[in-house]
Image (cartoon, grey):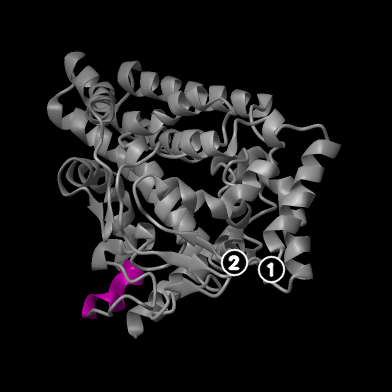
């Protein structure tokens, strides 16, 4: 049976057909809502009328079915839940305390501006932890089996300046369905400024992208925040994919929580007597730190060798692999034996596992990785792993340099 993604009226949710295994591996009906409810709850809701490209994936060869069977056995035999884990709740508490105490120190501590600037950098790292370790799981539906809990925790994205509504469409749908496919996966496009895939037309300035990209990362959060307003409220389109019109509540959430975040980081300091220039500088340092970290992590997951950049057949608009195999080919794990990095980035260093099981809480990824590796070996699929963070960083640098020379 051909598994496909076709956008009409409410058929946006059918792209989850390629992820149905995530529901079975997570304990079936006893632990989850119905598959249809889960598709609605864990992603963006039913998104209006969309009539973009029809992309097909090849017939299943049994890879995901076998993978689901073994992962389900892992959870059942160890009497574990894929979500709603106390370790994740404790981690969330630690990260929230990190954010609040660092913010309080920066705002209230009687120290020099130089020390406060360092505090802003630490606060930026804490916000990065919120994005990667807390909000990311929640907006994927991997934090809790209760969709209300996921929605509530997922709103942390809006507070830190990133619309959770638009992110679920852009990331959960476009990126996770069409990973590394130009024209669909918005996150590898780079708006022409950075050439991340060979399928992007080469420009003269790409020759220097491996050098100037490090100065782009820090400003990305400001671009995202501005882009949410521009894309979500006005353009309403990512490339050829229409963004469903935001409801009044979603619009209020998008704008209101952005303003709340700005009020905490700029408004409160000004109210307490800091000059506007100092308050804005502190905000800039915080978010530039956050942007640098989160962009590096994403690049190491998909924009380097040996990750593949797939082009659908131009005649049939089809992919020659089943969806799950595409995810393995286009993603890369890095530094899997580094527990500190794994804790901080929310398991995003296990990118292959994450793309196969986005509905599973990331605290389980280190245990699931060997299962994925075994099944990949049995099916003759290469599981891409860089043993160290440094090795992955060098590979990303070299990839950008190579693409800049073409």
Say what secondary structure mark 2 lies in.
Answer: loop
28 sits to left or right of 42: right
Is 257 rendered above or below residue 344? Answer: above
207 part of magenta stretch = yes
- Give percent across and percent down for residue 287: 32, 40
- Contact, mark 2 vs mark 1 (Cβ under 8 Å): yes
Q: Is residue 135 visible?
A: no
Q: Which residues are magenta?
A: 204-211
Question: Which residue lies most toward the bottom here?
Answer: 406
Residue 322, numbered circle: 2
In the picture, the quarter occupied by the N terminus is bottom right
Q: Is residue 208 magenta?
A: yes
Please, what is the dominant secondary structure of the magenta stretch? Answer: helix
The residue located at (37%, 35%) in the rendering is 118
Q: Is residue 140 visible?
A: yes
Q: Secondary structure at mark 1?
A: loop
From the top left corner, tell me how far across and down residue 300 is, in percent.
Answer: 50, 60
Determine the residue positioned at 31% across, 71% down.
209
């Amino acid at each position: 049976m051909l598994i496909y993604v076709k956008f009409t009226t409410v058929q946006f949710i059918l792209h989850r057909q390629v992820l149905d295994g995530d529901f079975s591996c997570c304990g079936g009906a006893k632990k989850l809502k119905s598959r249809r409810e889960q598709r609605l709850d864990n992603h963006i809701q039913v998104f209006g009328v969309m009539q973009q490209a029809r992309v097909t994936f090849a017939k299943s060869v049994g890879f995901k079915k076998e993978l689901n069977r073994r992962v389900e056995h892992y959870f059942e035999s160890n009497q574990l839940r894929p979500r709603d884990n106390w370790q994740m709740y404790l981690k969330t508490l630690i990260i929230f305390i990190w954010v609040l105490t660092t913010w309080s120190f920066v705002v209230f501590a009687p120290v020099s501006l130089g020390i406060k600037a360092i505090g802003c950098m630490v606060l930026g790292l804490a916000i990065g932890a919120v994005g990667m370790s807390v909000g990311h799981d929640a907006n994927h539906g991997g934090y809790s089996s209760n969709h209300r809990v996921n929605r509530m925790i997922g709103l942390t994205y809006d507070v830190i300046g990133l619309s959770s509504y638009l992110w679920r469409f852009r990331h959960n749908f476009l990126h996770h369905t069409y990973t590394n496919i130009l024209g669909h996966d918005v996150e590898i496009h780079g708006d022409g400024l950075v050439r991340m895939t060979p399928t992007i037309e080469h420009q003269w300035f790409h020759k220097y992208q491996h050098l100037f990209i490090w100065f782009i990362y820090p400003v990305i959060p400001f671009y995202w925040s501005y882009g949410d307003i521009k894309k979500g409220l006005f353009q309403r389109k990512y490339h050829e994919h229409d963004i469903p019109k935001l409801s009044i509540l979603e619009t209020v959430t998008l704008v209101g929580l952005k303003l709340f975040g700005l009020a905490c980081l700029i408004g409160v300091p000004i109210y307490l007597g800091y000059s506007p220039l100092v308050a804005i500088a502190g905000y800039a340092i915080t978010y530039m730190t956050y942007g640098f970290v989160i962009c590096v992590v994403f690049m190491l997951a998909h924009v380097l060798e040996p990750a593949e950049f797939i082009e659908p057949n131009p005649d049939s608009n089809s992919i020659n692999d089943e969806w799950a195999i595409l995810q393995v080919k286009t993603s890369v794990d890095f530094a899997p034996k580094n527990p500190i990095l794994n804790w901080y980035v929310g398991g995003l260093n296990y990118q292959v596992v994450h793309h196969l099981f986005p509905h599973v809480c990331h605290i389980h990824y280190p245990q699931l990785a060997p299962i994925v590796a075994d099944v990949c070996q049995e099916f003759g699929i290469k599981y891409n792993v860089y043993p160290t963070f440094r090795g992955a960083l060098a590979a990303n640098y070299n990839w950008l340099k190579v693409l800049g020379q073409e």
